[in-house]
């Protein structure tokens, strides 16, 4: 994880915790790629899957730290292929442009945590103790961003990463986001100034997303890295 849609990582984590509190422990986390297709099977079977968020070693790309356009996503496609409004407490933003033009979809993890989301330090995560869960079970590559992993051993004892934030997958586990709305300057200003409490969070999200009705959402508890 790193900066995204012009927001620093600390700001993103703080905003996601507000979302979590307003959603009775649930939140969505935008990601840059689709994980293994096996994740949908795990979601249907309600297999518990832990999520480990680690800070990337490389600095954020300029298109993420200072995008030319920022959008908020308003709908998602669930594990059964049905398109639904995003829950009323969820706010996922991203840069508005992709290679070849405007972004038409984005991906997100559906997560749950009963504990506050904070950036922790000092809890090691050793990717050499895991393999990719899909395909040939290849080692974790240096350029992988989001991957479904299975533990295969203790690792080499020299972890390069940390478990900076952890949660559990919930609901459809990962979803494709659709129906973006570009954020104009007033909405961007509202996003930058989001310091509301959990009680007022849903109204702020509705304003930034353009007043869409949203959807009520409740899921049970459900390692993604």
Image: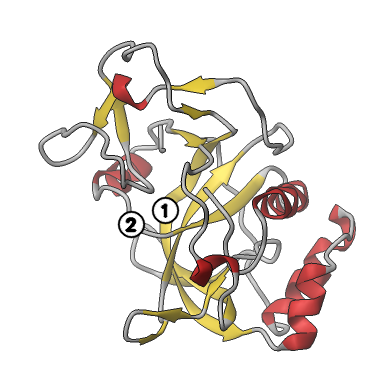
- Colour scheme in use: secondary structure
Mark 1 and mark 2: Cα distance apart in space? 8 Å
Q: Which residue is mark 2?
A: 34
State the count of labels: 2
The crowd level at tag 2 (other Cα within 10 Å; few <14, some 14-19, many 20+) is some
Using residue 50 as the reference point, say whether residue 191 is left or right of it. Answer: right
Q: x and y percent of residue 188 in the render? A: 74, 78
- Give whichever of discs 1 and 2 has the lower sequence position: 2
Question: For the view shown, which residue lies furthest in the left direction?
Answer: 136
Q: x and y percent of residue 30 in the render? A: 51, 59
Label annotation for residue 65: none
Residue nearest the viewer, comparing 73 with 213 = 73
**SS under mark 2:** loop
Q: x and y percent of residue 109 in the render? A: 48, 52
Quadrant for the C terminus in the image: top left
Q: Residue at x 35, y 27 (%)?
A: 127
Q: Are marks 1 and 2 in contact (CB under 8 Å)?
A: yes
Residue nearest the viewer, comparing 85 with 161 = 161
Q: x and y percent of residue 157 in the render? A: 38, 11
The crowd level at tag 1 (other Cα within 10 Å; few <14, some 14-19, many 20+) is many
Q: Which residue is mark 1?
A: 174
**Residue 207 in sight in this render:** no
Using residue 45 as the reference point, say whether residue 72 is left or right of it. Answer: right
**SS under mark 1:** strand
């Amino acid at each position: 994880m790193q900066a995204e849609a012009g927001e620093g990582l600390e700001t993103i984590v703080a905003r996601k915790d507000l979302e979590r509190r307003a959603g009775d422990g649930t939140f969505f986390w935008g990601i840059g790629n689709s994980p293994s297709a096996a994740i949908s099977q795990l979601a249907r079977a309600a297999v518990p899957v832990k999520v480990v968020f680690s800070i990337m070693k490389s600095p954020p790309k300029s298109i993420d730290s200072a995008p030319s356009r920022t959008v908020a996503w308003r709908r998602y496609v669930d594990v059964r292929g049905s398109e639904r409004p995003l829950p009323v407490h969820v706010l996922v933003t991203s840069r508005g442009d992709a290679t070849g033009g405007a972004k038409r979809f984005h991906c997100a993890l559906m997560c749950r945590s009963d504990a506050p989301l904070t950036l922790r330090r000092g809890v090691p995560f050793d990717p050499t103790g895991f393999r990719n869960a899909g395909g040939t079970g290849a080692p974790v590559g240096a350029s992988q961003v989001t991957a479904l992993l299975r533990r295969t051993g203790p690792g080499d004892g020299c972890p390069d990463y940390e478990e900076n934030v952890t949660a559990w997958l919930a609901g459809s586990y990962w979803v494709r986001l659709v129906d973006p709305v570009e954020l104009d300057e007033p909405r961007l200003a509202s996003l930058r100034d989001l310091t509301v409490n959990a009680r007022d969070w849903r109204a702020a999200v509705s304003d930034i997303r353009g007043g869409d009705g949203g959807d009520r959402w409740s899921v049970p508890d459900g390692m993604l890295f």
